[in-house]
Amino acid sequence: MIGAGQGSRLRPIDPFDLEIVATLHAQCFEEAWGVGAMAELLAMPGAFGLLAEAAGPEGEEPAGFVLARVAAGDCEILSIGVVPDHRRTGLGRILMQRTIRLAVGVGARRIFLEVAEDNWAARRLYAGLGFAAVGLRPRYYRGQGGSVAALTMRRIIARS
């Protein structure tokens, strides 16, 4: 396990973690991805994931994850989530920073992600990490309150 600081640890997601990650995804998003979707995603060339564990009432517990893919010099954050009990602890920043380092390590030059236009906390996090808005997908996310646009954000991580 890789020390992540601030009382949390990160480690690569392996096939035995798929149910855990699917459960975390369901705690973070209304449109949850199942175990099958996680397995298909992580089987794609260039895909990787990190599982964050943090101190909880009964010891270390799964607290967050990131799923990403690198292809042709671009890294795409496919999903990132931190469960409600561990939000605003810096865990999302730690997951993003480690993902950026891993992407750079395999030759990515740019990193992309999409975020709900009304997710101000995540948008502040990404802007603080050097991401800038480069596109908009109207009515992309569906939720209880209707649909909301997805903001596409990009960070240049290496010059070609």
Image: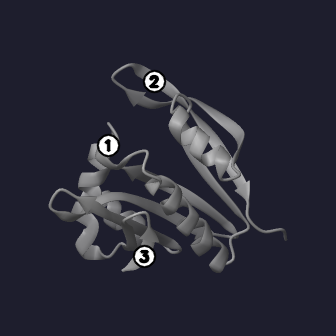
Residue for point 62% across, 63% down: 75
**Relative to residue 1, is residue 151 depicted above or below?**
above
Where disc 3 sits, the SS reads: strand
Query: Which amino acid does the dot numbered 2 rest on?
Result: Ser
Residue 95, x across and y down, in percent: 48, 61
| Relative side of 27 to 143, left or right | left
Query: Which amino acid does the dot numbered 1 rest on?
Result: Pro
Q: Going by the picture, which residue comes out furthest to the right?
A: 160
Residue 77, x across and y down, in percent: 54, 57
**Residue 77 visible in the current orientation:** yes
Q: Going by the picture, which residue comes out furthest to the top?
A: 145
Residue for point 78% across, 68% down: 158
Residue 89, x across and y down, in percent: 42, 50
- Pointer 3 and pointer 2: residues touching (CB < 8 Å)? no
Q: Which residue is mark 2?
A: 147
Q: Earlier in the sequence, mark 3 or mark 1?
A: 3
Of the pair 98 and 33, the residue shown nearer to us = 98
Residue for point 68% across, 71% down: 108
Q: CA distance from mark 3 to mark 2?
A: 38 Å
Pointer 2: residues within 10 angstroms few (<14), some, or many (20+)?
few
Q: Return the mark for residue 3.
A: 3
Pointer 1: residues within 10 angstroms few (<14), some, or many (20+)?
few
- Pointer 3 and pointer 1: residues touching (CB < 8 Å)? no
Q: Which residue is mark 1?
A: 84
Of the pair 129 and 55, the residue shown nearer to us = 55
The total number of labels drawn is: 3
Nearer the observer: mark 2 or 1; the answer is 1
Where disc 1 sits, the SS reads: helix
Q: Earlier in the sequence, mark 2 or mark 1?
A: 1
Query: Which amino acid does the dot numbered 3 rest on?
Result: Gly
